[in-house]
Image: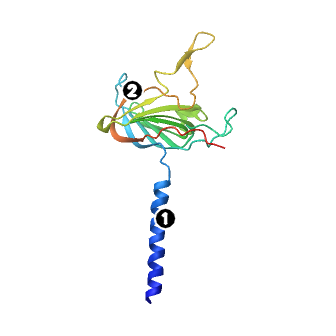
Amino acid sequence: MNLTKKLVALTVVATTAVAGISTAQAAPKVARVTGAADFMLPFAPDDDVRHFAFDATAAPYTRPIPGAPIGLPTDARGTVEISHYVAAWKQTIRAEGTVDCLVTGPGVASLTAKITRADEPVKEWVGKRLGFSVLDNGKHDRVGLSWTVVNLTQNASGQTEEAPVGTCMAPVPFAPVTKGDYKVRHVELPPLPQG
């Protein structure tokens, strides 16, 4: 290879490398929640194993809805996996959902997912939105969930029932993680796009 061809090749490689660095720096960071962990319910100690796995990423202004034709700054995508080993039954019950909303603060997140698949004991969850919260606190992570002892209301006949969950609605992370780890990447909600 002559000197001119070598210089052209080096220039192309250098230009490509610089363009790659510029693109990586220009790509905006988005909020995320990732990880998988077991947790316990402090008000109901038992031998059950409860487990959530999250892979949620903010996707602002991507889900148009009536009244918000370009979507919301909390729009998100990703998955939630739920499993609960019920020791008394010697059985694991599983469910999966698609994330539709995510909002973060430093070390904390709230997200919701619509359930797309669920095992028989919780089959009625399919199509329902569930809420989750995460505290990323090193070895002291916590999670919250929108069912069990929260999100209750009284219906017209005076009976207590579970209320519907709105987007990104979840209680504080009240359940301590016993095994595993969650990561929250906080990014401020982006402003309304111009134009």
Judge by depth and name the residue closer to the eye, 129 or 96.
Answer: 129
- What residue occupies the far top of the structure in this picture? 158
Q: Amino acid at mark 2?
A: Phe
Residue 7 x/y as whole percent: 44, 81
Residue 17 x/y as whole percent: 45, 67
Horizontal placement of 7 versus 160: left or right? left
Residue 60 x/y as whole percent: 57, 42
Horizontal placement of 53 versus 117: left or right? left
Label 1, label 2: how far apart the Cα atoms are: 45 Å
Is residue 160 shown above or below 144? above
Horizontal placement of 192 versus 54: left or right? right
Q: Quadrant of the C terminus?
A: top right
Residue 106: image quadrant is top left
Q: Name the residue tied to disc 1.
A: 19
Judge by depth and name the residue closer to the eye, 66 or 5.
Answer: 5
Q: How many marks?
A: 2
Q: Residues within 10 Å of mark 2 (few under 14, many from 20)?
A: some
Judge by depth and name the residue closer to the eye, 175 or 64.
Answer: 64
- Residue under the image location 57 percent in, 22 percent down: 163
- Residue under the image location 66 percent in, 35 percent down: 68
Q: Secondary structure at mark 2?
A: loop
Of callouts 1 and 2, the N-terminal one: 1
Residue 90: image quadrant is top left
**Contact (Cβ within 8 Å) of mark 1 with mark 2:** no
- Residue under the image location 39 percent in, 26 percent down: 174
Residue 70: image quadrant is top right
Q: Quadrant of the N terminus?
A: bottom left
Q: Name the residue tied to disc 2.
A: 174
Q: Residues within 10 Å of mark 1 (few under 14, many from 20)?
A: few
Residue 50 x/y as whole percent: 40, 34
Judge by depth and name the residue closer to the eye, 175 or 90.
Answer: 175
Q: Amino acid at mark 1?
A: Ala
